[in-house]
């Protein structure tokens, strides 16, 4: 469960007035301690390691285990953790009052419970987003902002999409999936403006079954806000063909009469022109 968390140099002017780390970056991970006692789940802790590898610090307070996931916002203002509740997880968020390589202090007395039955969540800047077991996506501002639904991204019987929160917490991408398409929507967290289907991925020329796309598509926003990078499967066409026998495995003869295969690709979407 590695997480790259960028840091902001300078003074933390948020509500908790805690200092941010002044390293170039820090890597967060969950370490689960092994237990030799049958039936007893070992405890897990959340750590940061500095970019030079010389310093390691435990982030989660005593009494909070990270077996089901812990995370820290990119500005080191918020700490989040998940506890199983039978349908997913109950996710809680609390402010970080001190953050340095000497240790973290989390004010659990001011924690906010996001909800129950949560299957995925992200915390970026002063924004938190999460998805429930019925595939409904919510977004809220911290601390204590009212949750706002962004709609559902899937069904139990059908395909499942997902969401991605911009690093500064100002925008959110949600996507829904069909057997041949992935549809991306863009949400402005503050203005609540929505750009529906601003970009669509298509895979209908492949003669296979199931969908290329799902809830685990990896995305990243460029620092200047111009591009969205999407790591997903894509179709690559090579030679003309009339049948599968003319193609080299794992290629098959696609609907466009070309030998076609499914491969991992990085897709760069220029956001200014995506909806045109």
Image: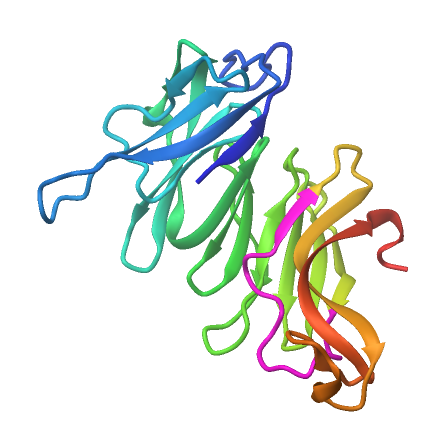
Is 170 a magenta residue? no
Q: Is residue 105 left or right of residue 200?
A: left
Residue 14 against residue 38 in the figure, above or below: above
Please identify the dominant SS of the magenta region: loop
At 75% from the left edge and 38% from the top edge, which residue is drawn? 222
Question: Count of labels shown?
Answer: 0
When asked about the image quadrant of residue 106, the answer is top left
At 53% from the left edge and 52% from the top edge, which residue is drawn? 138
User: Is residue 35 shown to the viewer in this render?
Assistant: yes
Residue 231 against residue 154 in the figure, above or below: above
In what quadrant of the picture does the N terminus appear?
top left
State the image coordinates of residue 15 (x, y, percent, origin top left).
Answer: 53, 19
In what quadrant of the picture does the C terminus appear?
bottom right
State the image coordinates of residue 103 (x, y, percent, origin top left).
Answer: 39, 13
At 27% from the left edge and 58% from the top edge, which residue is drawn? 86
Q: Is residue 203 left or right of residue 32?
A: right
Residue 100 against residue 244 in the figure, above or below: above
Q: Which residues are magenta?
A: 202-220
State the image coordinates of residue 68 (x, y, percent, origin top left).
Answer: 33, 44
User: Is residue 74 shown to the viewer in this render?
Assistant: no
When asked about the image quadrant of residue 226, the answer is top right
Colouring rule applied to residues = rainbow
Q: Is residue 112 left or right of residue 22?
A: left
Q: Residue furthest bottom?
A: 242
At 75% from the left edge and 47% from the top edge, which residue is drawn? 228
Q: Nearer the viewer, residue 68 or 197?
A: 68
Residue 230 against residue 41 in the figure, above or below: below
């Amino acid at each position: 469960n590695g997480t790259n968390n960028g840091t902001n140099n300078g003074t933390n002017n948020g509500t908790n007035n805690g200092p941010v780390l002044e390293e170039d970056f820090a890597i967060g991970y969950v370490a689960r301690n092994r237990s030799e006692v049958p039936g007893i789940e070992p405890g897990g802790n959340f750590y940061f390691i500095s970019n030079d590898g010389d310093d390691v610090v435990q982030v989660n307070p005593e009494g909070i285990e990270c077996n089901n996931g812990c995370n820290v916002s990119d500005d080191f203002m918020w700490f989040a953790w998940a506890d199983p509740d039978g349908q997913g997880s109950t996710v809680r968020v609390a402010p970080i009052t001190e953050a340095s390589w000497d240790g973290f202090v989390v004010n659990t007395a001011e924690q906010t419970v996001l909800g129950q039955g949560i299957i995925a969540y992200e915390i970026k800047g002063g924004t938190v987003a999460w998805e429930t077991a019925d595939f409904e996506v919510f977004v809220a501002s911290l601390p204590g902002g009212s949750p706002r639904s962004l709609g559902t991204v899937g069904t139990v019987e059908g395909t499942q999409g997902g969401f991605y929160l911009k690093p500064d917490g100002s925008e959110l991408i949600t996507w829904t999936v069909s057997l041949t398409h992935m549809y991306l929507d863009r949400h402005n967290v503050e203005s609540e403006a929505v750009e529906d289907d601003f970009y669509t991925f298509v895979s209908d020329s492949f003669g296979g079954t199931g969908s290329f796309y799902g809830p685990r598509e990896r995305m990243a926003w460029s620092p200047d806000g111009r591009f969205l990078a999407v790591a997903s499967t894509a179709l690559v066409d090579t030679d003309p063909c009339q049948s599968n026998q003319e193609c080299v495995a794992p290629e098959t003869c696609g609907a466009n009469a070309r030998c076609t295969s499914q491969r991992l690709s990085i897709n760069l979407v220029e956001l200014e022109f995506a909806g045109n």
